[in-house]
Image: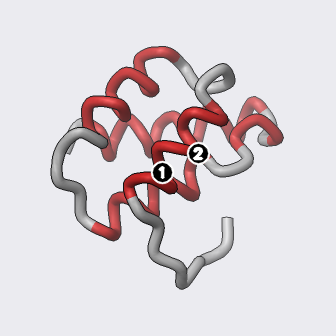
C-alpha cells in the first residue's frame, strides 16, 4: 500500500468500514466500531482507512497481514 497524503475523517473510515464489513472478521469490525466512537488521532484514522480500503480485493495472505496490523492498532 502506498503512502497517502489525504486525511480521512471518522465518517470516511466508518463509510469504508460499512462497505467492507462483510469481508472483515467480525471481531475486527466490532472493535473498529467501538474505536470509532472514541477520539482517534488522525494518524490512526488514516492507517485504518488504508488497511480496510480494497480489503475485499486483497489476497488471503494480504488480508492476514492487514488483520494483524488492525489487531495491533486496536490493542493500543
Q: Are marks 2 and 1 in contact (CB under 8 Å)?
A: yes
In this rendering, the answer to whether 15 lies above or below 1 is above
Quarter occupied by the C terminus = top left
Could you tell me which residue is drawn at 48 percent across and 51 percent down?
13
- Residue 1 percent location from the top left of the image: 67, 64
Above or below for 48 versus 8: above
Q: Position of residue 28 (x, y in %)?
A: 43, 26
Query: Which type of secondary structure does the marked residue at label 2 adopt?
Result: helix
Disc number for residue 69 = none
In the displayed structure image, the side of residue 31 where residue 39 appears, left or right: left
Asked whether, in this view, residue 42 is left or right of residue 16, the answer is left
Q: Indicate left or right for 69 with 38 as reference.
A: right
Mark 2 to mark 1 CA distance (whole Å): 5 Å
* Residue ID at (69%, 41%): 55
Task: Look at mark 1 in the image and give the residue it sits on.
Answer: 13
For disc 2, the marked residue is: 16
Of all residues shown, which one is farthest toward the bottom? 5
**Whole-percent x, y for residue 74 in the image:** 29, 38
- Decide: few, some or many residues near mark 2? Use Cα within 10 Å; few <14, some 14-19, many ≥20: some
In the rendered image, the vertical position of residue 27 relative to residue 66, given as above or below: above
Amino acid at each position: 500500500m502506498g503512502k497517502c497524503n489525504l486525511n480521512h475523517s471518522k465518517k470516511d473510515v466508518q463509510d469504508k468500514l460499512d462497505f467492507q464489513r462483510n469481508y472483515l472478521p467480525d471481531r475486527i469490525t466490532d472493535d473498529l466500531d467501538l474505536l470509532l466512537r472514541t477520539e482517534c488521532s488522525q494518524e490512526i484514522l488514516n492507517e485504518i482507512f488504508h488497511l480496510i480500503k480494497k480489503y475485499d480485493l486483497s489476497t488471503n495472505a494480504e488480508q492476514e497481514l492487514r488483520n494483524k496490523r488492525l489487531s495491533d492498532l486496536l490493542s493500543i
